Amino acid sequence: QVQLVESGGGLVQAGGSLRLSCAASGNTICISAMGWYRQAPGEKRELVAAITNDSTNYADSVKGRFTIFRDNAKNTLYLQMNSLKPEDTAVYYCNAVCPTGYGINSHYWGQGTQVTVSS
């Protein structure tokens, strides 16, 4: 089992910045990939950014504005969000993926942190 706790959300004006953090604990050695997802009211949860040992991926809507990175020594994942727009308003969730060895991945989720961008 992996436990994830997000922090760093809040209210910011358009054009501002926020940094989200996700502290992982438990069986963190199993983690092969981590990511940030977001879900706005009435919308589906969508992938914002993902990171593995050798790659990062971003949704087109955040490329050039958001940066995902991790501190393995602290078992912490981050999302640096710059040039925030009102459409970035959502609950942001941290995700960790652990392969089970049977071709199936286990997914773990944090509780979410609210990001609100005012215009």
Image: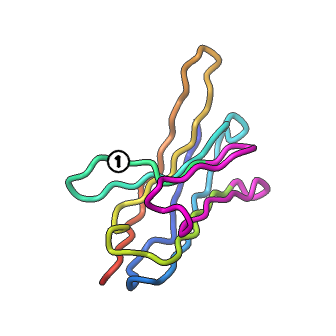
**Quarter holding residue 15:** bottom left
x and y percentages locating residue 98 in the rendered image: 61, 32
Image vertical order of residue 89 relative to residue 112, above or below: below
Q: 105 or 55, which is in the foreground? A: 55
Q: Which amino acid, mark 1?
A: Arg
x and y percentages locating residue 23 in the rendered image: 61, 57
Q: 30 or 51, which is in the foreground? A: 51
- Decide whether residue 76 is among the magenta residues: no
Q: In this image, 6 relative to 33: left or right? A: left
Disc 1 is placed on an element classified as: loop
- Decide whether residue 70 is among the magenta residues: yes
Q: In this image, 90 relative to 64: left or right? A: left
Q: Which residues are magenta?
A: 51-75
| Quadrant, the N terminus | top right
Image vertical order of residue 49 relative to residue 28, above or below: below
Label 1: how many Cα within 10 Å (few below 14, some 14–19, many 20+) = some
| Quadrant, the C terminus | bottom left
x and y percentages locating residue 19 in the rendered image: 56, 72
Q: In this image, 92 relative to 78: left or right? A: left
Residue displayed at 37% across by 67% down: 88
Image vertical order of residue 57 relative to residue 63, above or below: above
x and y percentages locating residue 87 in the rendered image: 32, 68
Residue displayed at 79% across by 56% down: 73
Q: 4 or 103, which is in the foreground? A: 103
